[in-house]
Image: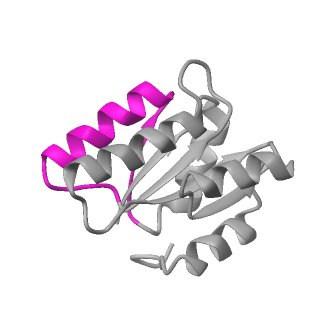
């Protein structure tokens, strides 16, 4: 599985990559613009990401805006199987959660990310480890 972790905080990025190492190859982006460049490049190469873990609060392009642009990109390119997106954020308010799902997020995990809950969310989306950690 190809995974992109989009997170401006170094520690959070490393933690998510560690949690995901048994699920597949993990690339990182530090902001929304970098994420969209990586997503475009992956689509152009014919190897799209299977999962994107996307922080909501980032400088520049927010996670919500990045998700909206990703979904527009998928529609424009005629992508049949859209990328699964899990929002990772400190925001727990109902408005943020509703906005994420309205933009077609597949999951929502609050920080600090609890490994057990995060893995449960992955499994709820039908994602399983590629190998034993």
Depth order, front residue of 59/1: 59
Q: Residue at x 62, y 63 (%)?
A: 107
Position of 129 compared to 74: left or right? right
User: Which region shows up in magenta?
Assistant: 24-49
* Residue 48 lies within the magenta run: yes
The furthest residue to the top? 60
Depth order, front residue of 107/119: 107
Coordinates of residue 39 in the picture (x, y in percent): 31, 42
Residue 53 vertical placement versus 117 (above, below):
above
Position of the N terminus, as image quadrant, is: bottom left
* Residue 26 lies within the magenta run: yes
**How is the model colour-coded?**
one colour
Depth order, front residue of 30/83: 83
The furthest residue to the right? 93
Q: Residue at x 71, y 64 (%)?
A: 115
Residue 104 vertical placement versus 70 (above, below):
below
Q: Residue at x 84, y 52 (%)?
A: 94
Depth order, front residue of 123/96: 96
């Amino acid at each position: 599985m190809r995974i992109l972790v989009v997170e401006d905080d170094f520690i959070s990025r490393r933690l998510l990559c560690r949690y995901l190492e048994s699920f597949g190859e993990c690339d990182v982006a530090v902001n929304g613009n970098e994420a969209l460049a990586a997503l475009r490049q992956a689509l152009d190469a014919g190897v799209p990401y299977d999962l994107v873990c996307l922080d909501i609060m980032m400088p520049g392009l927010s996670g919500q805006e990045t998700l909206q642009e990703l979904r527009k990109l998928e529609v424009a390119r005629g992508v049949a199987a859209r990328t699964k997106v899990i929002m990772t954020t400190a925001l727990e308010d109902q408005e943020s959660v509703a906005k994420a799902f309205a933009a077609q997020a597949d999951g929502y995990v609050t920080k600090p990310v609890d490994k057990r809950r995060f893995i449960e969310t992955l499994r709820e989306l039908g994602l399983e480890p590629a190998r034993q950690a």
